[in-house]
Amino acid sequence: MAADASMARMALRHRLADRGMDRTLLLLLPAVIFIVALFIYPFVYGLQLSFQPQPGSETVQRYGSGPFADYHNFFADSYLRDTIWTTLKLSLPAALFNVIASVPIAYRMRGRFRGKRTITTILVVPITLGTVLTAEGLLAFMGPTGWLNRLLMDAGIADHPVRFTHNYWGVLFSLIISGFPFAFLLTLSYLSGIDPTLERAAATLGAGWWQRFRYITLPLLAPGLGITFCLSFVLAFSVFPSAIMVGDPAGQTRVISIAAFHAAFEQYDYSMASAIAMIMGAVELIVIGLVLGWRSRLYRGATGGKG
């Protein structure tokens, strides 16, 4: 009997191994628990909360207690609905600028030259500063009494301080400063994965640097740039501290995250805050889907760079 049971276990083990299942899969268990506890459960909880309008809330008084009342309230209120466009106006240009600016710099930085490590360190330093410190630096440099305005007035270029902060431009500058290092490092890693012998072979055939970049490097880099743009966009779309510290949180830079914060911690309407968070995620998924769709049409190879 013991021998039969042992053979049965061996047979089961072999059948599971044929299907790619063995004990090594148990190593995934901690990661699965981590993902369920910190990502899936909060998402599912927030999703079901968004379909349960809070009793006595403004939403219930206006649109009843139906499961989509909070969503109806959001899209019916222009002050809330317009936060989507306000956030897109900040996040899309910031992500696009960071990706475009990172390409020529990363293209030059992939070679070997003196001072490469120093320049790379300077470019990556903003990652360590954090959003709050970056905002304080912007206020000190570009604020009404900052160095830039003093320089402009001393040079006679401006008669009064130019408003660079506490408006749209202040938040955009902050997003570019804090997001560029991520775009640069990702682009550099993708460029480092492209075989340099391809360009050398083209050079031996008489191709100039622009032709080599246009017809060899850029097509191979395009899939990586799509991913870089998506990550930069998600980072910028969730802007919150910058929109308050160097923006106009009640006007030009009232982004969607501020609307969610207002609902959750000022009105204590967690159902409405969850609905806004779900809408925020849906907008991000739509933009990412469009970019990845464009990426799949542009490039159908197995891989570009290996970054």
Image (cartoon, grey):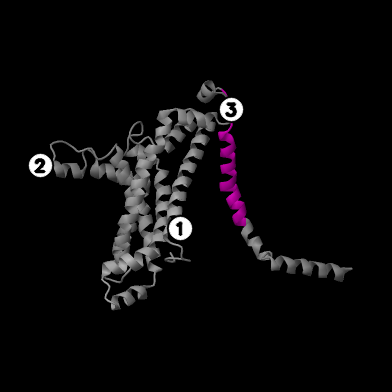
Residue highlighted by disc 2? 156
| Mark 3 to mark 2 CA distance (whole Å) | 61 Å
* Residue 153 appears in the figure: yes
> Does the magenta run of residues contain 39?
yes
> Does the magenta run of residues contain 125?
no
261 lies left or right of 40:
left
Magenta span: predominant SS is helix
Q: Position of residue 156 (x, y in %)?
A: 10, 42
* Residue 115 appears in the figure: no
| Mark 2 to mark 1 CA distance (whole Å) | 52 Å
Q: Is residue 224 above or below residue 47?
A: below
- The extreme right residue here reads 1
Name the residue: 33% across, 34% down: 252
Q: Secondary structure at mark 1?
A: helix
Amino acid bearing label 2: Gly
Q: Nearer the viewer, mark 2 or mark 1?
A: 1
| Mark 3 to mark 1 CA distance (whole Å) | 40 Å
Give the quadrant of the N terminus: bottom right
- The extreme bottom residue here reads 204
Number of numbered labels in the structure image = 3
Amino acid bearing label 3: Gly
Quarter residue 50 falls in:
top right
Sequence-first tag of 2 and 1: 2
Q: Residues within 10 Å of mark 3 (few under 14, many from 20)?
A: few
Q: Position of residue 70 (x, y in %)?
A: 52, 30
Q: Secondary structure at mark 3?
A: loop
Residue highlighted by disc 3? 66
Q: Position of residue 49 (x, y in %)?
A: 58, 35
Give the quadrant of the C terminus: bottom left
